[in-house]
Amino acid sequence: MRIHAPDYALDAAALRAAVTDRTRMIVLNTPHNPTGAVLSTAELESVAAVARENDLVVLSDEVYEHLVFDDERHVPIATLPGMFERTITVGSGGKTFSVTGWKIGWATGPADLVAKVLGVKQWFSFAAGTPLQHGIAAGLTLPDSRLAALGADLARKRDLLTDGLRELGLEVFHSKATYFVTADVAPLGVTDSLEFCRSLPERVGVAAVPNQVFHASPEGVETQVRFACCKRDEILADALLRLRKL
Ligand SMILES: Cc1ncc(COP(=O)(O)O)c(C=O)c1O
């Protein structure tokens, strides 16, 4: 189900309506890629209620748990009443420590659900790069203050990118977390973000992702584009200069 700009609030009624007697699992992602939305405790409680009432497992993708900006707070759904025993929580060293190519993460939850994950992993990729796992394990011993600093630095970059895109006349939706900022590129005369993003590297040497690839149908997000702010300041400045040519 989709959450809508500009506030990206969860539509609990739509979630409830989507559940049928064949539903087994809710896949949740907060903080959310691509919108940068962070679900509130009240929104998470409404998801938890649907899960409890229908005896569903929740697969909670929280890979951006530490990359949260300003006064936002990430709440793991597994911490809500009656949820630990039905939730698998997924984290990522790649995201937390900005080493996205490493593909090292973890799944936590009750032993019976983790055993199911292990069963699948065994037949998918068996193991992930062991030396890199040691690197992530060392990172996980860092004090929480170091992880909090990651969000602060990214928030500054989010501001650089958001302000720059707004100066270009684009509508930019407020990103509360993650590496991403979504902008509406309709003011550039764009009607299809897919086509726009395909041509962008060749036209100005900038890459972006059309939000419609995250949706089953492009309806409502035809002109929304995801830009990444997890870049050096000079790269962001250069990208904004290049986009100005449009
Ligand atoms: C929401 C979400 N979950 C999972 C992943 C995968 O994380 P990793 O690169 O650590 O495999 C990504 C990567 O973009 C993501 O955005």
Image (cartoon, grey):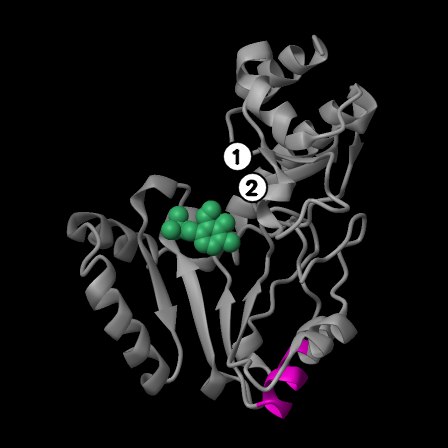
Side of 81 relative to 231 (left or right): right
Residue type beneath disc 1 = Cys
Q: Is residue 33 above or below residue 167?
A: below
Q: Nearer the viewer, residue 154 or 174?
A: 174
**Res. 78 visible in picture:** yes
Farthest residue, direction top: 245
Side of 104 relative to 95 (left or right): left
Q: Position of residue 94 (x, y in %)?
A: 38, 47
Specify the principal SS of the magenta part: helix
Residue type beneath disc 2 = Tyr
Side of 140 relative to 124 (left or right): right
Q: Is residue 48 magenta?
A: yes
Rendered-image quadrant of the C terminus: top right
Q: Residue at x 70, y 55 (%)?
A: 71
Q: Residue at x 55, y 80 (%)?
A: 23
Tell me, for residue 230, which label it has, or none: 1
Where disc 2 sits, the SS reads: loop
Q: Nearer the viewer, residue 11 or 146?
A: 11
Q: Which residue is mark 2?
A: 179
Q: Is residue 132 above or below residue 161?
A: below
Q: Quadrant of residue 114?
A: bottom left
Disc 1, disc 2: CB below 8 Å?
A: yes
Q: Position of residue 151 (x, y in %)?
A: 56, 47
User: Which badge, 1 or 2, comes first in the chain's sequence?
Assistant: 2
Where disc 1 sits, the SS reads: loop
Residue range corresponding to the magenta coloring:
47-54
Rendered-image quadrant of the N terminus: bottom right
Q: Is residue 182 above or below residue 59?
A: above
Q: Nearer the viewer, residue 69 or 173?
A: 173
Q: Residue at x 22, y 57 (%)?
A: 125
